[in-house]
Structures are given as C-alpha cells and as structure tokens.
Image: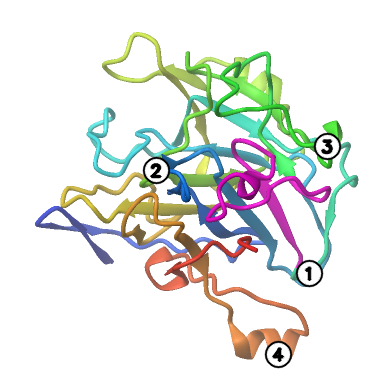
Amino acid sequence: KVNVISGSVAISLPLLHSKPGTIIVKEIYCGGCKRLPQEGDYQYDSYIILHNNYPQTEYLDGVCFGTLCPYNSNSNNPFGELPQMVPLIQATWRFPGSGTDFPLEPGEDAVLCLRGAIDHSAQYPLSVNLNKPEYFVCYNPTYFTNTSYHPAPGNNISPDRWLDVLVKTGQANAYTYSVSSPATVLFRFPEDVDAANYIGAEGSVVQVPGSSVDRVLMVRPEWVLDAVEVFNGASTSNTKRLLPSLDAGYVTLSGTFLGHSLFRYTDDSLSESMGYEVLKDSNNSSGDFYEREIQSLHE
C-alpha cells in the first residue's frame, strides 16, 4: 500500500503495479513563465515530451492523449471517489498516422505542443520555441476557435503533425490543460476495439456529476500506456485523481509562471547496459519525476 497525503489526511490506497511503459511521459511543462521584459504572466506555451522507453521501435500512430477530471488536484472530485475507469475531460486527442508513419526509436523523444506551436521565445525570452518541424500539436480550429490559446501552427509544423480530436466532450473554445496540476494520460485502443464504436457505446461518454455541460470519456485502465499525477504546490488540499495502478504517487509543481517543468529521472545504469536513454519508470511519480528550474526546450 501507499499513503497519499490529501491535505492533512493520510489515505491508504492499494498499490497495484502496472507493467513498465513503452511510450511514456518524459516532461510536463504546464505552468507558464513571466512575460519579461514585459509585465505579467504567460501560459500559452505548454508542452509535454514523450519518450520511447522500450528496446524496440514504437509508433506514435494512434496514441491518444487526454487529461483527467477534475482539471486540478485541489478541486473537488465530482465522482466522490476514485472511479475504476479513467475519466478524460474536455477532449481526447489522437496522434495521426496509418500505423507506421511516426516511428519512435528506443530512447527517442517526441514533443507535443498543447497550445501554440509557434516560437513563443521570440517575444518572451523566458519561453520556448515550439515551431520546429519534428514537433506535434493539439490543433483543431473547428472545435477550438480561441486563437490566443490555439494560434495557427508555425511555418515549420506540417498539417500531418496536427493531432486529431477523437472526441470533444466539453463546451470550451480552448483545450483546457491545468496550469498548476494536470493529471496526464496516454493510452491506445486495442487492435480489436474500434474507437468510434467504443465512443458511441452506452456508458463510454458520461455526464460529469453535478455538471449540465461537461462530459467525460471513460477509458479502461488496462489501455493506459502512461499516466502522471501532478499536485499543486500552492495548495494544502490536493487529492489523488489517478488510480494507484496507473500512478501510485504524484509529483508536485511548486508554483506557476516560473518557467519550471516536471522531468523524469534517467536510469543511468540501465541506460548504459541497454545502449540508449532509459528513463526511470517505477509507476510512482513521487520517485520518477523532479521539478526542473528551466524547461528542457529553453534555448
């Protein structure tokens, strides 16, 4: 079992280990930075980095991405307790490709821009340049029309690297990814499960309790490739949203608009023996991640 602190209460949860991940989350940059040399805060430059931790080529084609309900770790859980399914809110995205279009070699990374795939650093030096040809982006101007959050991707981002909206379950005009404490999920549908049929089946998309507008896509936990729970360091009332079988712990983001990111440790000894970068993956973000002072993509 693992004890998870929720405010001042220690909660005992059964610890069920999932199998080591293939494609996993390497870095989460969600907290934004300062607008220096101007005044104020900047939050339109979020990204995550994915990593192939497996000793064979994996493919991003068909990998799905989403974030949990509730958005923030210090929000009340509308389900009352940890649901046995994985409730993804607002929208679920899917990498494009027909199966082998986007290979990821052992130890290779892939950057996913969650908002603007542009050079944010050109105006705000503490930010990052996300206009690079190998990057992917969550961009769909039909569903998400707010151009502050979702400007047209930069000239280096080809349309074949725009993720598809698998299903939109919320009403917002911008994709909502928590600045302080997202719970990020990567998953893939099994070969014998048709995504459209699953989404259309009864019980797959359900109303969020207490909400008249928000719905969630319920994903089976055995489909999850990786999941990372982030706690809000400015709050004393954080609560687990992920099942312990998906992430037995959490990593804390100390504050927002600092340019910090959450980064996974490298397993040096295993990397040396395997011949490529192997990241620590113990199914517990408390020991697998740390907080960086500067985003890894900062130049």
Q: Tell me the CA gap for discs 1 and 2.
A: 42 Å
Q: Residue at x 31, y 14 (%)?
A: 211
Q: Residues within 10 Å of mark 1 (few under 14, many from 20)?
A: many
Left or right placement of residue 168 versus residue 9 in this view: right
Quickly name the residue at label 1: 106
Q: Secondary structure at mark 2?
A: loop
SS at badge 3: loop
Q: Amino acid at mark 3?
A: Asn
Query: Residue 194: horizontal and vertical position, in percent?
Result: 73, 27
Distance of label 3 from label 2 (alpha carbons): 28 Å
Tag 1 near tag 2, CB within 8 Å? no
Q: Give residue 189's quadrant in the image.
A: top right
The residue mark sitting in front, 4 or 3, is 3
Q: Secondary structure at mark 1?
A: loop
Q: Nearer the viewer, mark 1 or mark 3?
A: 3
**Residue 111 included in the magenta stretch of the image:** yes
* Label ID, residue 39: 2
Q: Residue beneath label 3, please?
A: 155
Report the magenta stretch's main SS: loop
How dense is the environment of label 3, judged by Cα within 10 Å: few (below 14), some, or many (20 and up)?
Answer: few
Viewer can see residue 250: no
Residue drawn at (47%, 40%), measured in percent from left and top?
43
Q: CA distance from mark 4 to mark 2?
A: 45 Å
